[in-house]
Image (tube, coloured by chain):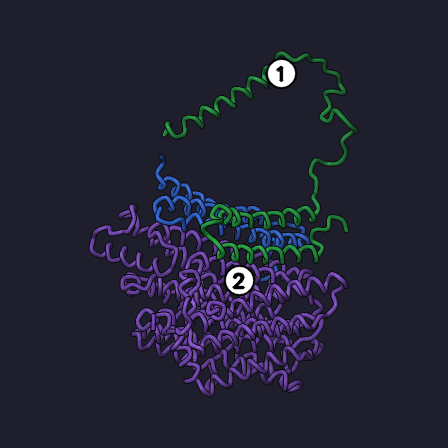
Chain colours: A blue, B green, C purple
Amino acid sequence: MISPIVYVALATILFFLGGAGFLFRRNVLVSLMSIEIMLNATNLALVAFNRLHTDSHTGQMLTFFVIAVAAAEVAVGLAIVISFFRIKRSVRTDEADLLRN
Amino acid sequence: MFATYGPMFLLLTVAALIALLFYTGATVLGPKNPTPDKMKPYECGSESSGGNHLKLSVKFYLTAILFVVFDIEAVFIYPWAVHFKTLGWTGLISMFSFLAVVIVALVYCVKKGALEWEK
Amino acid sequence: MNLFFALSPFLTLALGALLLMVAEAAAAGNGRGEKVRPGLALGAALTCFASCAAAAGVWFYGVERIEGLDVLQPWLIIDRFTLFFAGLLALGGGLASLLAGGYLPEHQIERGEFYALLLFSTLGALILAAAGDVLTLFLGLETMSLGVYALTAFRRASPRSAEAALKYFLLGSFAAALLLFGFALLYGATGHTDLAGLGQAVKTIASGALSGQAAGPTTLGAAAGPLVLFGFILVLAGLVFKVSAVPFHMWTPDAYEGAPTPATSFMAVAVKAGAFAVLLRVLLVCFGDKQSTSWANGWPAVIAWIAVLTMTVANLVAGRQESAKRMLAYSSIAHAGYLLVGVVATSRDGTAGTSGILFYLLGYTVATIGAFGGLILAGHRGAEAVSFEDLAGLGRRHPAAALPFALFLLSLAGVPPTAGFFGKWFILKAAMEGGFSVLTVVAFLNSVLGAYYYLKVLVYLYMREPGAGAPIATPMKSGYVNVALAVSAFFVVLIGLDPSRSLSVATRAAASLFGG
């Protein structure tokens, strides 16, 4: 059996990959995907940690809710991206430059 | 580690071997009779037209997203169904109120015309 | 039955939101036009006020007398702290929907979704304030945020609105992911997702680290300490983002400026109050042990630095704005800074600091709604008042529209005897008595500095005339906005004239957080 720590390590790596993708890429869709990767890394961490705390299944249960919320979040996010694209004809975040000091 | 995942690796190897076997077998053994028409990218039907990058209508997005959102709600029904007996009336009432909210959302989608494909 | 009574603030909002959603869809199904439906704003406002009244009802009945609330443990905690926030958030939501009832038809963006989204968002904020577990915390946070993202994007034809929503959404979800991963690590280290259990476990781990032995309750052993620390940093980053404090404030001015003004007022009021409720709960319940609340090893020093930076940066930048709406956005960041000073104070005397924060939020809520309402009232169709120039001379031409605006700005600036003054007073007093004298002085200097840009608006209102050829703003007419302004003005004056009554309510609410 592989130790849960390995999964936690993988989750951490995924989380930082997602974070880096969010911070360094300028495409809105890539940013959305990066956020999804971060949330999925969280799910992985929760499920893996659940192996350490087997007296209840809180981690597993929380994962269900995170999945559901992430789906709703993407629905709203894509709607916003589409309304942005309709006006700007672009999905790049550096096109979002109207609001400045 | 191998004891746990050994069968899986075995399965993967066998699957890869079989795929390789069929592929090479068809190339080596099959009869070949190439003609110019057959060598075209789209052999059957009419000539291809337009670019290969197809712009999808926003309608696809809307339907797909609605599907995903409603589909994910099923996640909560499975654990409840598995423990249907132990959860008893409390579980039943909770699940019914949850489903009632989901149905309200569905009614809202229908009323708003989000599910009408053609308009 | 008891349970339904205790949950009535939540259930009222949930049922009202669902009904409003269906009613709006049914009405839209026939006409398909962008016709004006004044009933929706009224319905939304009444739902919120009913929820507010329900919270008050449970409060006066005595939440301690209601039995059977253990069923909700640990998901929702119904105590006086929660009820205070329920009332406050519902009041904010109700006033914001009144503002929307005037603003949306005037600017021809009246679509019924606004009210349903607003109500769901308010419900999310209520759940957030009541959350006693990571699960409900996350659900509440996301329910609130998703609604607000959609509200920000509400002006579909406006590039600014789309851009603001995009920025807000991306950064907001990023922050939520940070928060969640932080909680996942805390769960890993402690095995708890309920905040109270988390607090106990953190205490054990912290005392274990002090005595030099790894006394983590899990098989993780020595790894538990760093895991808790790392998790705490991520959680704090997520929460600091939600209260829009420096260095995670960059989204605030953009989102506030691009959103329709009623949505902006809702964001400034409800999102901020909800985020502070959860920040207080997380810091005081999860990280309320001696080690974590000490200046040398805990969060107070971190929060103090964030508070100082937030106040100073926001006040300096706010003074340079040309848009009054953007100025109000920076002012809301500055107010987050003052509130964080109160959070630092809670590390010494929990009840005093928390009651100061609650009182401040009360005054801040009504004054902010009022200020944005004043801004809404100053413009009309096709000519929204945004910049300072738009407001020039309004006080002389339309004194009735300018007077409440001036009152709310004075309250935000903290001029006695308004609600805002006493809010600052109680927070600074708590910080001073907690021994954070340098922080208190910095906060005081900042509030003096902050008064400058509020007074600048007053100067434009009463002492300037619009430039030659500039469009002359004429106020819009709307019963809804007038009612919202009247209610806000009533509260600002009432709290200012009789602060002791509000403070005693805030103190009882704060005491319940510490089991009092």
- The residue that appears at 43% across and 60% down in the rendered structure is C75
User: Dot 1: what SS?
Assistant: helix
Question: In which quadrant of the rendered view does residue C149 lie?
Answer: bottom right
- As shown in the figure, which amino acid type bears the numbered disc 2? Met
Q: Position of residue C306 (x, y in %)?
A: 40, 65
- As shown in the figure, which amino acid type bears the numbered disc 1? Ala
Question: In which quadrant of the rendered view does residue C385 lie?
Answer: bottom right
- The residue that appears at 57% across and 51% down in the rendered structure is A74
Q: Name the residue under label 2.
A: C144
Q: Where is residue C199 in the image (x, y as percent from the top left)?
A: 33, 60
Q: Can residue B49 be seen in this view?
A: yes
- Relative to B7, say whether C224 is above or below: below
> Which mark, by number, is residue C226?
none
- Relative to A35, say whether B100 is above or below: below
Q: Position of residue C121 (x, y in %)?
A: 55, 64
Q: Mark 1 points at which residue?
A: B26
In three-dimensional space, the C-alpha distance between marks 2 and 1, rounded to whole angstroms, equals 59 Å
* Chain containing the residue with disc 2: C
10 Å crowding of disc 2: few (<14), some (14-19), many (20+):
many
Give C245 or B27, whichever is nearer the viewer: B27
